[in-house]
Image (cartoon, helix red, strand yellow):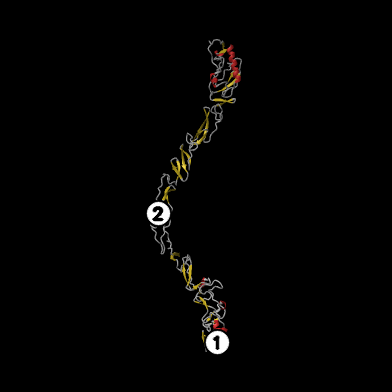
Amino acid sequence: MGGTALHVGTAAPASKAGHPGTAGPGGRVLWSGPMFRRWALALVMASIGCGFNERGFQGTPQDEADAAPAIDGAVPADAPGLRDGAPASPDRPTEVGGCSASSCPAPANADPFCVSGQCGFICRRGFHKMGDGCAANDQVGCCGDGCLMCAPPANGTIACTNRQCVLTCNGGFHPSGTQCVANDSPACCGAGCAPCPAVSHGTAQCRNGACDFVCDAGFHKEGAACAMDDSAACCGPTCARCPAPANGAAACKSGQCSFTCDSNFHPAGNGCAINGDLACCGPGCQMCSPTRANASAVCMTGGCADPSPCLTTHHDCNGACVANDAVGTCGAACTPCAERPNATVSCNGTACVYACAMNFADCDGNPNNGCEANLLTDARNCGGCATAPKDPHICAGGGSQQQVCVNGQCGCPAGWGNCNGDGSDGCEVNLLTSNVHCGACNPRNPSETDLLTEEAYKAANADPACRVYKLETCELGHCKGP
């Protein structure tokens, strides 16, 4: 095919026994007899049962190259011999009693022939059969015997060469099947079109025809993998192992070795110092001293406290540490404590505290008047603050003379007495003038009539009442007679 000459037949030796024949035009032998009839019948049956191939010839490519089929090894001498590019001679028929090559039509780039009374054509070299015509073998739209459509790829060109679609890729690309892929494509890397393996925490790449990868932010290359930048075991691009100080743990930050301190410790230089160490405080390992009077030095996480906190016996007042009991600067507001009657004042560190003087009390609950009650003389709060209307600390009133509070005890004033024991009528007896209770309350509590006769006086046991029956009278608390 593709320009190969089709040899229809060749001459056979004349001495072939049992196959007589006669010479035809041009010295070729025209076969006759039974052998010729068998060959002609086979050729006709073959032409009827088989179609023409891609070059317009009936049979196989080998038949095309070796001319018409022979029967029993004999080749008819009168089969025309066609050469590629040369049409058959019009005065030399291709078969006895049949058509001639000159009478058979042929498309462009083809030669006609006649076999068994049927016209055909064979495509010339460099062409192949396409429908009823002959197409060039290197035609992109109809390439090769199968008339393939060579689809042009992206980033490349297509051509039909030797009846096959041939792909040519642009610079920076290489073939992969029917496509042109970039030389740096991780899915098809290099001439071998190898897929680049995926990398955890990274992105596969193809560089200069070889697989490579780049790590995500926060990661760096470590062999064929991506390691975390902040990994203390493989820190930074050099994959350094970070050391751990005493009382701390190794760490990696932004690709640089670092460390963290344990609880109750803080960084100090290249190590960890215990919190509160006044001799090595904070990252600078400074020495802590009090920054003001009545204060104590303290080491904080970041360094020495400034200002230093006040002692527990003092509190801060406008930047100075003052005593908690300072009444002039009491509490967080540093408020001066006001003076109050019959009371002493102090400060407990947060508020003013008042204490009543001895024998005085704040019975009305009003702090502004201080300790207003004198428990030794106050008849309403005698010996203590009264809490109820009939409280025993309330001295009795009413009658001739109200009770008074003397040394914290309710009683009658001098010369008077509560001889009936009824507090509601106060001190009803004048002990300076009463004959019944002269100078003191008579526990027998006799009446005036009990004093008129000696018998009544004795019967009433009226002593120390005055003996009226002897004309005694009470004068200034004493019984006097005539």
Instruction: Classify 273 as above or below 169.
Output: below
Front residue (pair 70, 31): 70
Determine the secondary structure under disc 1.
Answer: helix
Q: Are marks 1 and 2 in contact (CB under 8 Å)?
A: no
Front residue (pair 107, 171): 171
Question: In the rendered image, is residue 476 in sight?
Answer: no
Q: Residues within 10 Å of mark 1 (few under 14, many from 20)?
A: some
Mark 1 against mark 2, which lies toward the viewer?
1
Image quadrant in which you'd find residue 17 = top right
Expressed as whole percent of the image width and height from the top left, the position of residue 273 reads 40, 54
Determine the secondary structure under disc 2.
Answer: strand
Expressed as whole percent of the image width and height from the top left, the position of residue 48 reads 61, 19
Expressed as whole percent of the image width and height from the top left, the position of residue 97 reads 61, 15
Image quadrant in which you'd find residue 132 = top right
Three-letter amino acid code at the position of disc 2: Ala
- CA gap between label 1 and label 2 equals 108 Å
Q: In the rendered image, which quarter contains the N terminus?
A: top right
Question: In the rendered image, is residue 360 in sight?
Answer: yes
Three-letter amino acid code at the position of disc 1: Tyr
Instruction: Classify 250 as above or below 101.
Output: below
Q: Which mark is residue 469?
A: 1
Residue ID for mark 2: 273
Expressed as whole percent of the image width and height from the top left, the position of residue 3 reads 53, 23
At 48% from the left and 68% from the top, the residue drawn is: 352
